[in-house]
Image (spheres, grey):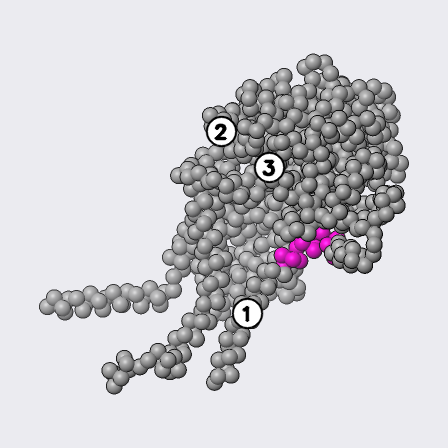
């Protein structure tokens, strides 16, 4: 029987169930694999090669320059400032988590029209980032009399008798960045609120009942019941915030175009590639971004690996140890 | 079972096909979107072909970038005289994305009889695509910019249909209301005049267009050659290894003027981040804005939006060169050439002669006409005191070197990216950082430039 199987011709094998299973699945897999290779892996590999070269956008006569491009990113202040700007967004997202948690706790308590408020708070997240940016461009406008009116924010301030402020002020990049961070918080906070509401609602009501019986006040309830239960979600959100902070793009790109010291890493990468035409340097920036994202993802995976997975791996390790002990004996 | 296999194979094929046509059709969609004229253009081209076989009139197909003048019919109207005189039919085909579309058509033999020569075609390749119109020695006596599309043997393959002068756009009424009678000749006079406008009128003296800085700020760069008063300045920067921001050069006075202007809050708008390009055309016409640095191409656009087009004026660069004269660089627009594969070459050449010479198209568009003896257009009447010159061509051994240094150093003289020195200067000025900041920015740029120059030129 065994010999017979080996002698079977290719044509016969082609018609068997096993054969079909193999080549049909291979054919089906081929389509996504070819697409993945041509549109993801080949370009990514090229990008890594380019990042060690000095090359223009046509790729005429590229020169190998070693790690010069990477050196530029971390030493040239024009490029390094983008990391500084990322810190604004990082701090912003910490604030965002705190506010989101607060709003989520309020929305989980006994208040009226919960659904309505949830909808209102989540709505900005559904809006397109470009639309949000254009709305806030108007919001922060300082009018140019006699040409244009004051923007929304300044008009409101004027109603309270406060002089209009120039929000987008070249002399004050900190203020400009804070305005942009505010827009970012406004846009993304809805998502966080929903995440926290989900986490808080999954806490067993028995625990609440127990702490009510013990006479805990709302703060104590939050400190000893809610917070410990949703800690994993909070750390996950904070890790995602790092990713978000380094890859901020559309809000500053549309509101300031990266001027006034608000350039972010992604904006700078695009400008380097398509405006300054230094494709090598831009590729190096893309690689740096890729590496940062990979590191953050690994940290996230490591901290939030499945408990059962860990147990399974450990028990397997023990088994292996036992086996080797037996073998030695 | 077989049917099932066939279906799955078919499905896979379909999926692949869908993916690839998906890519294809989306890029087609892009071209249609970017050039609203493609459909009509194609249909006129088809019409031209059928006419060609049916009628006895010769047909000339002319490819042009001026879709605006094809659409409003003014080109057809203008061409009637030529058609009647030569018993022919001229068909205009306009492309919005001219250089890109024509480059594709030039992959075949069919790219019209007469066309604007795309600047991507290298000078040494001109003879592969175009028929020579004449030699430089014949044509340069009669036409400006005859050397623009010339090969090494001095055969000319195309003539510019018009040219632009470099200067500053302003509202005549606002300037007159402020009591200014003579045009400024130096940066100090210019700033003093703007101050007068601020004091005596309600208009904003200067509008920075900073929201669109990535291109509007590059308009300042076009003043550089005029300010230097040296047609050979760009080459001298390389051969004489001049300091990029030398005080007697072209860059320093232009960017010093920009810095001083942007440092004075009274002379510019309050919020630079929300300037509006399209609306500014109307505001300028209404006299709410006094001045803007823009190429003369903008004059026609601003006049179109103004209630009274005559208020839009154009003045020479308010910078006097070292020799005490005011200069204005002129630059040519597209050059018109004849397709080497055309069936009606003689007629096509006649058309080129007529279009750049007698048609009066350039004058109508407010451009400098190509014929040397023709009068300047009205909008350049302020330029009578200034001396016109054209940039001298780059010598063979330096071709491409300027751009190479420009990219390598990261100075990017024509760029408007956020690291560009123009943006840095503007923002330092807005923030009121003063003279020292200006000096340190230009010193850094000069150093970057010099380093790259020494690397490239050895």
In terms of image quadrants, where is residue B290? top right
Q: Which residue is mark 2?
A: B456
Crowd tier of the residue under label 3, counting other residues whose Cα lies within 10 Å: few below 14, some 14–19, many 20 or above: few
Q: Residue at coordinates 66% horizontally, 20% vertically from top-left?
A: B230
Q: Which residue is mark 1?
A: B15
Crowd tier of the residue under label 2, counting other residues whose Cα lies within 10 Å: few below 14, some 14–19, many 20 or above: few
In the image, residue A196 sits, relative to residue A256, either above or below, namely below
For disc 3, the chain is B
Choose between B81 and A74: the one closer to the eye: B81
Q: Find residue B318 and report its horizontal and vertical position in percent.
A: 74, 22
The stretch in magenta equals B26-39
Mark 1 to mark 3 CA distance (whole Å): 46 Å
Looking at marks 1 and 3 on the same chain, the residue that comes earlier in the sequence is marked by 1
Q: Find residue B87 and report its horizontal and vertical position in percent.
A: 86, 47
Whether discs 1 and 2 lie on one chain: the answer is yes
Q: Residue at coordinates 17% horizontally, 66% vertically from top-left?
A: A324
Mark 1 to mark 2 CA distance (whole Å): 50 Å
């Amino acid at each position: 029987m065994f010999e017979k199987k080996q002698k079977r011709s290719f044509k016969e094998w082609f018609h068997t169930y096993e054969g079909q299973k193999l080549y049909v699945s291979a054919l089906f897999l081929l389509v996504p694999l070819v697409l993945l290779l041509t549109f993801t892996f080949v370009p990514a590999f090229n990008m890594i090669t380019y990042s060690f070269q000095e090359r223009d956008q046509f790729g005429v006569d590229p020169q190998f320059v070693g790690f010069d491009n990477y050196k530029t990113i971390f030493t040239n202040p024009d490029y390094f400032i983008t990391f500084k700007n990322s810190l604004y967004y990082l701090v912003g997202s910490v604030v965002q988590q705190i506010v989101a948690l607060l709003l989520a706790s309020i929305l989980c308590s006994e208040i009226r029209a919960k659904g309505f408020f949830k909808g209102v708070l989540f709505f900005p997240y559904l809006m397109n980032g470009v639309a949000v940016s254009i709305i806030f461009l108007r919001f922060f406008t300082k009018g140019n009399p006699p040409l244009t009116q004051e923007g929304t924010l300044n008009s409101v301030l004027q109603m309270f008798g406060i002089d209009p402020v120039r929000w987008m002020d070249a002399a004050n990049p900190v203020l400009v960045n804070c305005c942009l961070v505010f827009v970012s918080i406004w846009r993304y906070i809805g998502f966080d609120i929903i995440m926290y509401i989900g986490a808080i609602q999954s806490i067993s009501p028995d625990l609440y009942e127990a702490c009510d019986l013990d006479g805990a006040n709302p703060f104590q309830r939050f400190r000893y019941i809610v917070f410990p239960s949703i800690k994993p979600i909070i750390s996950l959100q904070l890790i995602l915030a790092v990713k978000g902070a380094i890859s901020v793009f559309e809000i500053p790109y549309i509101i300031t175009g990266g001027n006034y010291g608000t350039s972010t890493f992604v904006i700078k990468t695009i400008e380097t590639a398509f405006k300054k035409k230094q494709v090598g340097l831009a590729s190096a920036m893309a690689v740096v971004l890729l590496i940062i994202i990979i590191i953050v993802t690994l940290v996230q995976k490591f901290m939030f690996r499945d408990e059962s997975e860990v147990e399974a791996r450990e028990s397997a390790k023990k088994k292996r140890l036992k086996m080797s002990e037996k073998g030695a004996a | 079972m077989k049917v099932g296999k066939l279906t799955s194979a078919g499905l896979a094929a379909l999926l692949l096909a869908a993916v690839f046509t998906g890519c294809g059709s989306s890029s087609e969609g892009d071209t249609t979107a970017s050039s609203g004229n493609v459909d009509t253009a194609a249909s006129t081209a088809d019409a031209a072909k059928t006419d060609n076989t049916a009628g006895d009139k010769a047909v000339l197909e002319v490819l042009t970038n001026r879709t605006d003048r094809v659409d409003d019919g003014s080109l057809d109207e203008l061409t009637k005289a030529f058609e009647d005189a030569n018993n022919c039919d001229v068909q205009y085909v306009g492309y919005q994305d001219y250089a890109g579309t024509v480059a594709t058509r030039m992959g075949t033999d069919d790219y019209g009889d007469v066309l604007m020569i795309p600047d991507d075609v290298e000078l040494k390749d001109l003879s592969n695509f175009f028929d020579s119109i004449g030699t430089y020695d014949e044509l340069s006596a009669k036409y400006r910019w005859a050397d623009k599309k010339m090969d090494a043997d001095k055969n000319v393959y195309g003539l510019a249909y018009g040219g632009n002068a470099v200067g500053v756009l302003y509202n005549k009424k606002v300037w007159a209301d402020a009591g200014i009678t003579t045009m400024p000749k130096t940066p100090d006079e210019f700033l003093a005049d703007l101050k007068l406008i601020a004091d005596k009128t309600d208009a904003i003296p200067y509008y920075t267009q900073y929201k669109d800085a990535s291109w509007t700020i590059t308009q300042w760069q076009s003043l550089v050659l005029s300010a230097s008063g040296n047609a050979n300045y760009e080459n001298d920067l390389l051969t004489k290894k001049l300091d990029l921001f030398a005080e007697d050069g072209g860059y320093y006075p232009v960017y010093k003027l920009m810095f001083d202007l942007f440092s004075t809050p009274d002379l510019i708008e309050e919020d630079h981040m929300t300037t509006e390009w399209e609306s500014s055309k109307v505001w300028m016409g209404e006299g709410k804005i006094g001045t803007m640095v823009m190429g003369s191409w903008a004059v026609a656009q601003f006049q179109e939006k103004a209630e009274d087009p005559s208020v839009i004026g154009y003045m020479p660069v308010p910078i006097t060169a070292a020799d005490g004269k005011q200069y204005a660089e002129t630059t040519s627009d597209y050059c018109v050439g004849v397709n080497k594969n055309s069936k009606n070459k003689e007629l096509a050449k006649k058309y080129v002669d007529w279009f750049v010479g007698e048609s009066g198209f350039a004058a109508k568009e407010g451009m400098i006409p190509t014929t040397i003896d023709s009068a300047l257009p009205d909008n350049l009447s302020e330029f009578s005191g200034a001396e016109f010159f054209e940039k001298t061509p780059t010598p063979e051994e330096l071709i491409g070197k300027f751009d190479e240094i420009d990219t390598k150093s990261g100075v990017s003289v024509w760029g408007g990216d956020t690291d560009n020195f123009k943006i840095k200067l503007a923002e330092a000025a807005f923030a009121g950082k003063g003279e020292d900041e200006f000096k340190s920015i230009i010193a850094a740029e000069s150093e970057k430039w010099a380093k790259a120059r020494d690397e490239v030129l050895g």
